[in-house]
Image: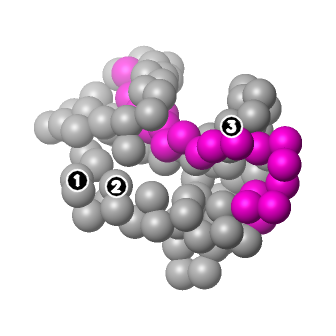
Amino acid sequence: MTVLATNVRVGRFEIDIVAREADTVVVVEVRTRGTTSWQTGLQSIDGRKAARVRRAGEQLWRERFERDRSVNRMRFDVAAVTFTAGGEAAIEHARGVL
């Protein structure tokens, strides 16, 4: 996967990471949690947040990728980053979950 851009503004929305994997544009929502959090980064995405990410991706598709013949689809992923007590980051990448 190649990162195309980070912190992309699309209208009133923001997309954390826009990447590309072969003929797929990947919209990645990044969620960060500390060791004392009650829920994981994946658990922190409710239906409303998922809908906002999808609307942002749909708008991005219309504005930048709809006419690009090298792109055939869009996928919505989540990268959950959890920091350990020692300050190290553990990353969980969930593909196609939104």
* Up/down of 55 relative to 72, above or below: below
Q: Which residue is mark 1?
A: 46
Q: Is residue 93 above or below residue 59?
A: above
Q: How far apart are the two marked residues, 1 and 2, measured between alpha carbons? A: 6 Å
Find the magenta span and give its range: 64-84
Indicate which disc, 1 or 3, sits on the residue closer to the N terminus: 3
Residue 26 rendering spot, x and y as whole percentages: 62, 41
Q: Mark 2 = which residue?
A: 50
Q: Is residue 28 left or right of residue 96?
A: right
Q: Position of residue 88 (x, y in %)?
A: 49, 20
Q: CA distance from mark 1 to mark 3?
A: 25 Å
Q: Are marks 1 and 2 in contact (CB under 8 Å)?
A: yes
Is 77 part of what is drawn in magenta? Answer: yes
What is the residue that sits farthest to the bottom in this orientation? 12
Kindly identify the amino acid type of the residue bearing the numbered disc 3.
Thr
Say whether residue 47 is left or right of residue 55. left
Query: Which circle, 2 or 3, is nearer the viewer?
Result: 3
